[in-house]
Amino acid sequence: MADLPTHTIVFEILTRLPAKDVGHSKSVCKQWYALLSTQDFVKIHCSRSVVSSNQRVLLIDDLTCSVRPIISNNNDYGPSSTVTFPFHHQNNDVSILSHLNGLLCVCLNHTYELLLWNPTTTAFKRLSTPDSHGFYINNLDAIGLYVDADDDYKVLHIKRRSGVLGVYVYSREVHSWRNIPFITRQEYLSPHFNWSAGTFCGGTLYFTVCECWIVGTNVVICFDVNSEQFKEISFPPVPSNGMVQGVLVNVKNVLHMFASTGMFEMTIDLWTLQGDYWIKVLSCPPIPPISLSLWCDITHYVTNGNWFVMTKLGKLFTIEMDMKPFECFYPVSWFRGFKGAVFVQTIVSPSI
């Protein structure tokens, strides 16, 4: 280190600071402000921030929004801090659709507007335009947030309307939307199919597409974010008697799926994608019977070798696994009756 220039040493130190401390450091001097505002700094700082110890849980209820640290040794949340929305909203109005590297893609339910929002820096960007782009309708549309090879953060919007079916990409770099072709079976754009939110993994956005809860077609649609081509791969070979639900998760840049099947008793298997084929990792014992309303709200996350199956009323089932690669949380959309997400604190900006 003694032979390194002072500028390099400062750069290395600052890229390891917590995101909020980076914000405070910008006021030290003009040179630091310029350094901490460069895209190179933001990219390197982000890569060093995406670790399990830097993850936070953001919870939204009717009146408040709070952020809590995760205490991994007892699988609980730490003390909360209140977050003030930097944009106008109404009660129970903000829905989290996708997130990546500290950015959340959210929808304001009363206006249908899409926004990119960094809860750590409070910066946000409206994605809606006068020509009707950037408006989201629940149960009809699907959203995926990703970053391409040029480090441009983008939003893929699967948009389904009466008489209007299309796919659009928003670019943070140029702040505009454009239409791209959907090259796979057009019936998947029909409202008869339910699309999940996109899961970004290894340069591809993955969506589960299910025709209905009980019996029907279940597939995974893959979107290559650099070639902007779609393709279809099969669902894991799970039993089709009863309801089928697939929840995708990126674990250290390898795609996994929690596949839930059953009716009065559920079986949950964990699968990993190798090439275009699914390999079963493990199965858990059947979960005791629970009501349909709770079943539909089950989500999953894993940390430090423990696998949790959650409902909106609380933790339902825990499995201990001796699998070190799973030292991370899955960003679910419901936590104990709250809307929310697990995210990492970064200084990534929603706009340039």
Image (cartoon, grey):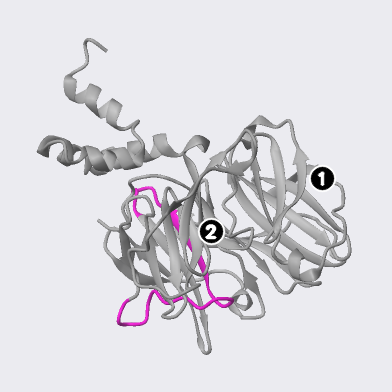
Specify the farthest residue to the left: 30
Main SS of the magenta part reads loop
Query: Count the marks: how many?
Result: 2
Q: Nearer the viewer, residue 321 or 256?
A: 321
Specify the farthest residue to the top: 2
* Residue 180 image-quadrant placement: bottom left
Residue at image location 47% in from the left, 74% down from the top = 91
Report which residue position mark 1 lands on: 283
Mark 1 secondary-structure assignment: strand
Quarter the C terminus occupies = bottom left
Callout 1 crowding tier (Cα within 10 Å): few <14, some 14–19, many ≥20: few
Task: Please report contact status of discs 2 and 1: CB closer than 8 Å, yes or no.
Answer: no
Which amino acid type corresponds to the residue marked 1 in the rendered image?
Answer: Ser
Cα distance between the residues tagged 2 and 1: 27 Å
Image: magenta residue range = 129-152
Can I make out residue 350 in this image? yes
Callout 2 crowding tier (Cα within 10 Å): few <14, some 14–19, many ≥20: many
- Give how far across and how far down residue 192 sits, in percent: 67, 80
Can I make out residue 225 in this image? no
Residue at image location 81% in from the left, 57% down from the top = 238
Query: Is residue 26 positioned above or below 263 on the image?
Result: above
Q: Which mark is residue 340?
A: 2
Which amino acid type corresponds to the residue marked 2 in the rendered image?
Answer: Gly
Q: Which mark is residue 18?
A: none
- Along the horizontal axis of the image, is 76 left or right of 340? right
- Along the horizontal axis of the image, is 9 left or right of 126? left
- Along the horizontal axis of the image, is 338 left or right of 136? right
